[in-house]
Amino acid sequence: MRLTALLAAPLLLAAAAPSPAGSAEATAAVAAAPAAYQLAWADEFVGDAPNTAEWSYRTDTKGSQQRPENVAVGGGLMTISLCPKNRAGANCGTTVDSGGLYTGGGLISKRRLRYGYYETRAKTNVGKGWHSAFWAAQLGGTSPQTEIDGFEVDSVAPAKIRHNVIGWDQGGLRTSGIYDTFDTSAAFHTYGFEWREDSVRFYVDGVLVERQGVPVTYPADSYLHNFLNVWLTAIAYPPAAPDVDESALPGKVQFDYFRFYQRDAYADNDTPAGTYTESGTGWTTSSVRGFAGLTARFSCDSGTAGRWTITPPATGSYDVYFYRVGGSGGQVDAPVTVWDGSTALIRSRVDLTQASGWVRLGNQALTGGTSYIVRIDRDGAGCIRADSVKLVRSN
């Protein structure tokens, strides 16, 4: 986790998150996603090992040496063992060469996600010197980029928590600062964040923790919103690392699950899942900024087409939008069509000479889990540009 000293711009968060009902030892109830969200991907940590088809191990050296053998799955939990120097594995039972460092660990999702509701349920460790976090940032990404911290807890003060939205090299830091809450090491609690095009909202045990419900403003037209890996981690971290409470080792941080929910659906030429394809010749990356600061594509050759495969998360009525990357030289009446197999559901013409922004194509009843095609074709003078499409739930 990249922490900074840039804590001067406070979020509109309450001074303290509400405490769960009952005693500090009680397990908080599992929180639900905000209304209209549909579960899109989850790992409940069943079985006897991490699912390496979905997760990579954190293996860097930062304060501690992060090691795969410190991460285990069993009993419906993912457990990160926090170990003395040159020890690792479950309950720190293996001697290793960690260069004289403590050892920690974590998991990093192989999926890269963007807008939706992210949630985990976790219990931190007892004993100072460790930094536990639930966060999202692109693995190996270079700035500018986005980082969102669902929670950060330094074990020297387990009853204090922090949430951040960081626009690295974009002049953007929004932080709650460190505020008082319940003892995060005494019981499991639920932490979530909802990322939208214009904002981020943080939840603790299902309660929105911004003051008066005001979200963290973080608009896509001002910041780069890239696709993020999810990190569930616990590491010794300077300046805490020199002061690790060795009497509390072996220690552990546990995660009950990770869940990702969607309300709307997006498809982008930059989507890691490969939901965008091109046909014809002359396709080139545009110098014009695409949606959320990512790239756009264009072609000026006859007979070319760009197409997105997009899948609504649930059955319902959706407004269908096309992101117009506008400017001189564009086709003034480029055809954009929404297809269900060979059936055209919506036909529209978009003037690509106009300013960039979302263009509503129409409203359509769509079936959850069914893949639809949105296609732009060049059938006239000028160039076509292809970037993003989205389905926005309207009922």
Image (cartoon, helix red, strand yellow):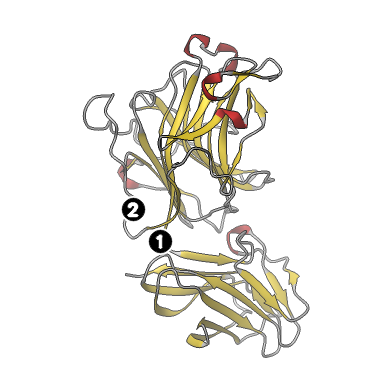
Residue 83, image quadrant: top right
Density class for disc 2 (Cα within 10 Å; few <14, some 14-19, many ≥20) is some
Query: Pointers 1 and 2 in contact (CB under 8 A)?
Result: yes
Residue under numbered circle 2: 34
Q: Residue at x 69, y 45 (%)?
A: 142
Q: Quadrant of the C terminus?
A: bottom left
Residue 263 numbered tag: 1
Looking at the rendered structure, the kind of residue marked 1 is Arg
Q: CA distance from mark 1 to mark 2?
A: 9 Å
Q: Quadrant of the N terminus?
A: top right
Pick the residue in front: 362 or 206. Answer: 206
Give the side of residue 135 with respect to residue 238, left or right.
Answer: left
Residue 56, percent across and down?
61, 42
Pick the residue in front: 97 or 200. Answer: 97
Q: Residue at x 58, y 44 (%)?
A: 52
Looking at this view, name the residue that lies furthest to the bottom.
380
Q: Up-down: is 31 above or below 271?
A: above
Q: Residue at x 54, y 44 (%)?
A: 51
Give the side of residue 312 with respect to residue 221, left or right.
Answer: left
Which sits earlier in the primary sequence, circle 1 or circle 2?
A: 2
